[in-house]
Image (cartoon, rainbow, N blue to C red):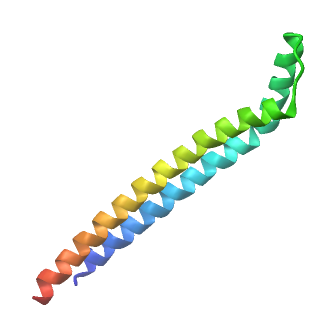
Amino acid sequence: MENQDYNKAEKAVDNTENSLRNAANDAKWKISDLADRARDYINEKRNNDEEASQEDWLDRVKANAAETWEDIKDGANEAWEKTKDAAEDVKAEWNKKTN
């Protein structure tokens, strides 16, 4: 196998790592915003003369977490496909050279 084939596979792994790292960072930012969002929720309820409840708040957080998970899952799937495709290319090159 030629060095360029190894480089191609290594680059695919690096891209996968970067995609997952970006997805994790996005999730961290969303989590760090929860305190501000909780304050906004409480103020919204107060302004509307409604009672803020933990259950209602957690339902909102749960919906947001589900959206975040979908974003992370999409990034992970994309990274998987890119890595898988690069690995298949490297395998095909290896098979050409050994057959």
| Image spot of residue 92 (x, y percent) | 18, 75
Residue 56 in the figure: left or right of residue 93: right
Q: Is residue 63 above or below residue 81?
A: above
| Image spot of residue 76 (x, y percent) | 47, 56
At a point 50% along the width and 58% down the height, the residue shown is 18
Which quadrant of the figure has residue 49? Answer: top right
In this orientation, which residue lies closer to the viewer: 37 or 9?
Answer: 37
Residue 28 in the figure: left or right of residue 88: right
Q: Residue furthest bottom?
A: 98
Q: How many marks?
A: 0
At a point 79% along the width and 30% down the height, the residue shown is 56
Q: Residue furthest top?
A: 48
Q: Is residue 85 above or below residue 99?
A: above
At a point 40% along the width and 61% down the height, the residue shown is 80
**Quadrant of the snapshot with the C terminus:** bottom left
At a point 85% along the width and 28% down the height, the residue shown is 39
Which quadrant of the figure has residue 58? Answer: top right
| Image spot of residue 68 (x, y percent) | 60, 43
Q: Residue furthest front?
A: 55
Which quadrant of the figure has residue 38? Answer: top right
**Quadrant of the snapshot with the N terminus:** bottom left
Residue 2 in the figure: left or right of residue 26: left
Q: Is residue 26 above or below residue 15?
A: above
| Image spot of residue 10 (x, y percent) | 38, 72
Q: Is residue 50 above or below residue 81?
A: above
